[in-house]
Amino acid sequence: MRDRFMSLIVALAAVLAFSPVALAGQRGGQAPAAPSVPHDPHDLSGVWTKTWRTLTFSEQAPPMTPEGKAKSRLSEFATIRHEVADRHIETEVLFNFAFRIVSMQNRGLVPNYEASMAKLWGSELSQRMALLGMQMQGLYGQLGRGSPQAMLNGRVLSMFLESPANTIRGGTSEVQRNIIAIRGLGLPR
């Protein structure tokens, strides 16, 4: 499980670090072309902005660095860097849940609510990871395996489509929360 999440984090970091979402660098930092010019989907000279929990492509002037240069990579956007950092921290939390379960089993204990905590955290983390991947890829995130323009061979789309089932498979999130409340916190039914 940890390998799957860590490989996705590495893949998302590679998208951040190595795939330039060219902002105005290709046009010399000038205003975009007139709207009457047909838009080439491979011309990424617009700006990726975060609105309503999705990344959308816009043809506005690019954000600038303090030195006056146009930002040219997703990794230069603080909100995306923070989202990736949050997902990394959450993956480490899931890894520690797994270590706790293994150590309890080694001591002969039964991980009752601890397993529910790990399942609940992992299934909801997979949804957040998939959503972040889709947001980072923008409209290209909708391309599946086999498409020549698909980033990461469509793995993020597959994860995005499968992630809602993770909250149901192996016990719904509501059932897991009830187990945590009753067995872990001792709350009444």
Image: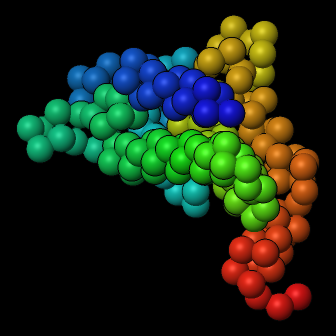
Q: How many labels sit on residues?
A: 0
Q: How is the image coloured?
A: rainbow
Quadrant assignment for the C terminus: bottom right
Residue at 82% over, 65% down: 176
Residue 18 visible (yes or no): yes
Relative vertical location of residue 7 with respect to residue 93 in this rendering, above or below:
above
- Compared to residue 46, the image places residue 56 above or below, namely below
Residue 115, image x, y percentages: 75, 55
> Is the residue 74 above or below the residue 91 in the image?
above
Q: Position of residue 55 (x, y in %)?
A: 54, 46
Q: Quadrant of residue 162?
A: top right
Q: Would residue 40 be found to the left or right of residue 89 on screen?
A: right
Q: Residue furthest left?
A: 67
* Percent x, y of residue 165: 87, 46
Q: Name the residue located 58 percent from the left edge and 60 percent from the top edge.
A: 52
Q: Residue at point 71% right, 21% down?
A: 154
**Relative to 131, 72 lies left or right:** left
